[in-house]
Image: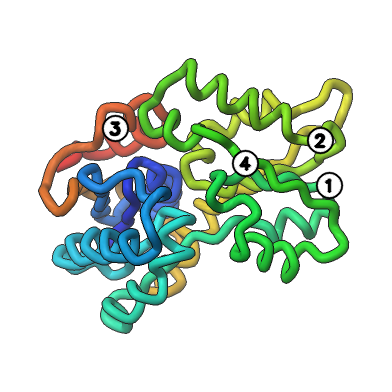
Amino acid sequence: MKIALMDSGIGLLAATAAVRRLRPDADLVLSLDPDGMPWGPRTPQDLTARAVAVAEAAAAHRPDALIVGCNTATVHALPALRARLEPAVPVVGTVPAIKPAAAGGGPVAIWATPATTGSPYQRDLIRDFADGVSVTEVPCWGLAEAVEHADESAIDAAVAAAAALTPDVVTTVVLGCTHYELVAERIRAAVQQPGTPPLVLHGSAGAVAAQALRRIGAGPAPDAPVTGTVTVLLSGREGALPEPALAYAEGRLLRTVSPAS
């Protein structure tokens, strides 16, 4: 079994680690775009072109499925990616976990990039899945970039700024950017109010990994032999995980399972 994941940077680590935990025997292909990152400020057309190139580099390694480990790329490029690769390679996008978060009753905060916050895409998800639930959209200025570079002081500052915009009554936070899942516990500590029940965080990595397995007719096998390899593509070139990836448990998990090639 071979699963490919793509993103402009290391935001794909959360979903990659989720796949690794479900199937330690799966070979992984991680396709990043350091030459084109960040994708967020790009026009939809430019972003789609970059995403298609990164996906095609991954597809050349003949994966059984491709996970788009980026919310922004899913919004803008998923139709083009599916048109290009399916049905030969099932393509699984990443959508903010607003539906399961709203099922808990709220109040809910959605932490997302400034470009996604207030966007028609996110507003449509709120309308479709969180009708009647109190939802606060929180723009997280600079957080994805700080996580990408493992800049500890910048992460602390960005998390604190977003926490200040999050109402004290919030019981649930949706991590609406895949980078944020890498610092989930720091977000929890910043938002959790003293004397209140434990804050609920909803990321997408686990659901995305499980969906990829379903799309290829495979099930979880967390006790399978740890035989999976890791191949890293950097704007189409074979390389190694960026050094900041090793600042996170998800990146270190990949290093301990098998060396990146």
Numbered disc in front, either 4 or 2:
4
Numbered disc in front, either 4 or 1:
4
**For the residue marked with disc 2, what is the amino acid?**
Pro
- Drawn side of residue 257 relative to residue 135, left or right: left
Image height of 183 relative to 229, above or below: above
- Whole-angstrom CA distance, mark 4 to mark 2, is 13 Å
Question: Residue at the location (75% across, 67% down)?
Answer: 127
Residue most toward the left? 237
Question: Residue at the location (24% across, 37% down)?
Answer: 241
User: Which residue carries the number 4 mark?
Assistant: 139
Q: Are marks 4 and 1 in contact (CB under 8 Å)?
A: no
User: Which residue carries the number 1 mark?
Assistant: 107
Q: How many marks?
A: 4
**For the residue marked with disc 3, what is the amino acid?**
Thr
Q: Secondary structure at mark 3?
A: helix
User: Which residue carries the number 3 mark?
Assistant: 256
- Mark found first going from the N terminus, 4 or 3: 4
Q: Report x, y in % for residue 223.
A: 41, 50
Q: Are marks 4 and 3 in contact (CB under 8 Å)?
A: no
- Whole-angstrom CA distance, mark 3 to mark 1, is 39 Å
Which class describes the residues within 10 Å of circle 2: few (<14), some (14-19), or many (20+)? some
Residue 222 visible in this rendered orientation of the protein: no
Question: Residue at the location (78% across, 33% down)?
Answer: 198
